[in-house]
Amino acid sequence: MSDAELYELRRRTLALERRLDALDGGTPAASGPEGDAELERLVREGWAMLAIVRYRDLTGVGMAEARTAVDALMRG
């Protein structure tokens, strides 16, 4: 499986998780990014763009702020 195919699968998985959260009545933004296992995994595995999307979903911030935050997380 190519990197592009893996990226697309992860993107679709995250989209499905967001929809399930919405159906469940859960609001990921309420918990914040701290300790979010999915965000930590994406950062650890180097999936920067998906980590930014996840960070935005968790916090509601804009793209620039999410990118800055994820860049900082990836630097450790």
Image (tube, rainbow, N blue to C red):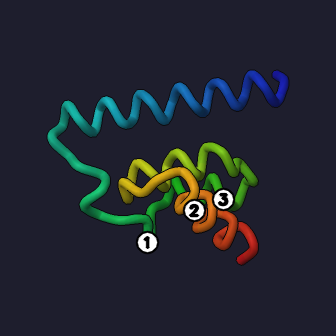
User: Label 2, on which residue?
Assistant: 40
Residue 50 lies in quadrant: top right
Which residue is pictured at 57% across the width and 31% down the height?
A: 11
CA gap between label 1 and label 3 equals 13 Å
> Is residue 9 depicted above or below 56 in this figure?
above
- Quick one: label 1, few (<14), some, or many (20+) residues within 10 Å? few
Residue 60 picture quarter: bottom left
**Residue occupying the point 71% across, 67% down:** 74
Q: Earlier in the sequence, mark 1 or mark 3?
A: 1
Q: Residues within 10 Å of mark 2 (few under 14, many from 20)?
A: some
In the displayed structure, does residue 32 sit left or right of residue 66?
left
Q: Which mark is residue 34?
A: 1
Front residue of 48/44: it is: 48
Q: Quadrant of the N terminus?
A: top right
Residue sitting at x 69%, y 51%: 48
Amino acid type, mark 3: Val
